[in-house]
Image (spheres, grey):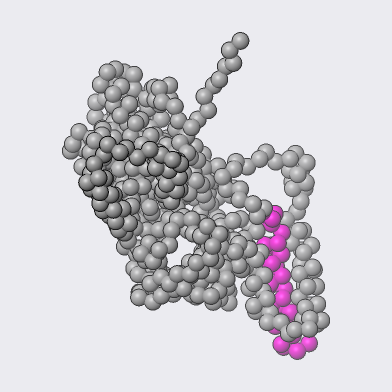
Amino acid sequence: MSLLKIKKFYLLIITSLILAQALAQDPIEKKPQLLLAEKEPDKKTVKQKATTDPEKDIYQWLRTVSEVVTLVEKKAYRETDFSNFVQESLKAAVPHVDAHSAFFSNESYKATLESTSGEFSGIGVSIIGKTPDDDALVIVDVIHGGPAQKGGLKPGDKIIEVEGDKLRGLSTDEVITKLKGKVGTEVNLKIIRDKKPLEFKIKREIIKDQNSICYHIKDHDIYYLSLKLFTQTASKQVEDLLKKANKGQCNGIILDLRRNPGGILDSVVDMAGLFIDKKSLVVSTKSRSGKVVAKYYTSTEPVLKSDLPIFILIDNFTASASEILAGCLKYYSNKGFKSTDNKKPRNLMAFLVGTSTFGKGSVQEVIPISNGCALKLTTMLYYLPSQKSIQAIGIKPDFLVKPKITPAEEIKWIKELYGKETSLKHYIIPKEIKKDDINKDKDKDKQAKSKEETEKSWEEKHQEAINQDEQIKTCINLINMLNFAKKCNPNLVDTRKKALRFLKQNYVTDQEVKLEKLK
């Protein structure tokens, strides 16, 4: 046997081992399962798995893999680049381990490392992860003032091509790497919006670490903060808000974590420390054997000293770090705090409003391997202080409130057809109105229409969206009701449990109400 054949044979055996290990894993369904709790396994299936020998499974498939490679090498009409063959095989196989695991080929890993070092930038979007089989990458949100927002991209857009390359066959990480690039360079995107293909040219920029927006709702003396990502400075932004709230007679805070995909774990721990006592457990990680790998505790004294109500908005795109914060604050709100200074114990009054969260409770490691490749592998799960995992389950809100926003175009269409007297056939024109007054009214209408057609700034659009947001209005009403109860009968709502019962008894949300048929 020649030296070249020996090398090929050696490479084949090594590759077969790796492939067989990946292929031996249970395949996952292509349908999204992230928001559903796992079903109880069938007893027969459990019995079969218990008697299965993993090592035997691997060697059972080694022969099949070897046969495929041998036949392709000997009989395939087209000569095969086995380096590409193996890498593409692994790229397809590894996602079968779990939804967040991936294989980085030599080129993709190199590009990923380059895009995270030096002067590289992006377009400023939050996205939902995709598998290599998916044709599109969905934009969950665009960062305020970022390149995507300036270029006209919107939440809900589906990216189907980057620089002319279709996304099928690419992992989420590979697409993100393509979106990143040197500052000032442009990236060409093709997206689907309302079933129509559109093309955009977005200029890459350094994405600023200011990813929150804050308002004071003056009429109700409530602070509102929307946080889009957990970054290095996110904790400082929330700390500044809490200090302002401590100074005045603020009635409550609305922390909007909707469409927040997560971010830096340290940022979550720091932010939790603003609300809960020093040295409190925020989250822990466990391996597949159930062994605790790490525990994360707060290291500072809380900034929030009072029982000021905190209403946290969540939705199905609230994921990872966002879920950890929401779940942690809910846990300590239920538990309460022990008094450390012989004073009355402090009650944390945190409530969750909206819909169930995404359910991303896993931890990934990027592990460099041979031939310049790398493996991104899920190695641990996150556990809340209650020792419950959020993986594939998520967190349920205290108050179920579904989003109810009618698109502006639809509202305009309804008004034009049905929303006024002039939309009716044969409507009466009051003849008693003077012609001069009618002309004046027409001029005013023209001016108002001209002003309406003028392009609004992003902040004006954002404020308009907040005013139409029923979930935010629900939070305002709940805060007002809670403060009214405090003034009238403090004992009625002096703990989170009592407050929750009082609010649910007196405020109907989208949760089902019990009905009894009258005879």
Answer with left or right where residue 267 lies relative to residue 136. Answer: left
Q: Where residue 264 appears, x then y in whole percent?
A: 40, 55
**Residue at the extreme front:** 431
Q: Where residue 83 appears, x then y in whole percent?
A: 65, 79
**Residue at the extreme top:** 519
Q: Which residues are magenta?
A: 1-28
* Quadrant of image for the C terminus: top right
User: Which residue lies at the image location 76% right of the left edge and 67% below the top edge?
Assistant: 62
User: Which residue lies at the image location 55% right of the left edge and 50% below the top edge?
Assistant: 287
Answer with left or right where residue 230 lies relative to residue 439. Answer: right
Answer with the quarter of the image where residue 150 lies.
bottom left
* Residue 364 visible to the viewer: no
Please check the rendered image and state whether residue 14 is part of the magenta-colored stretch, yes or no. yes
User: Which residue lies at the image location 33% right of the left edge and 42% below the top edge?
Assistant: 467
* Quadrant of image for the N terminus: bottom right
Answer with the quarter of the image where residue 517 lies.
top right
Q: Main secondary structure of the magenta part?
A: helix
* Residue 165 visible to the viewer: yes
Number of numbered discs visible in the structure rendering? 0
Vertical relation: 331 (above or below) 465 = above
Vertical relation: 177 (above or below) 517 = below
Q: Where residue 22 appears, x then y in whole percent?
A: 67, 62
**Residue at the extreme left:** 247
Please check the rendered image and state whether residue 23 is part of the magenta-colored stretch, yes or no. yes
User: Which residue lies at the image location 74% right of the left edge and 79% below the top edge?
Assistant: 9
Q: Where residue 236 appears, x then y in whole percent?
A: 27, 51
Closer-to-camera residue (27/128): 128
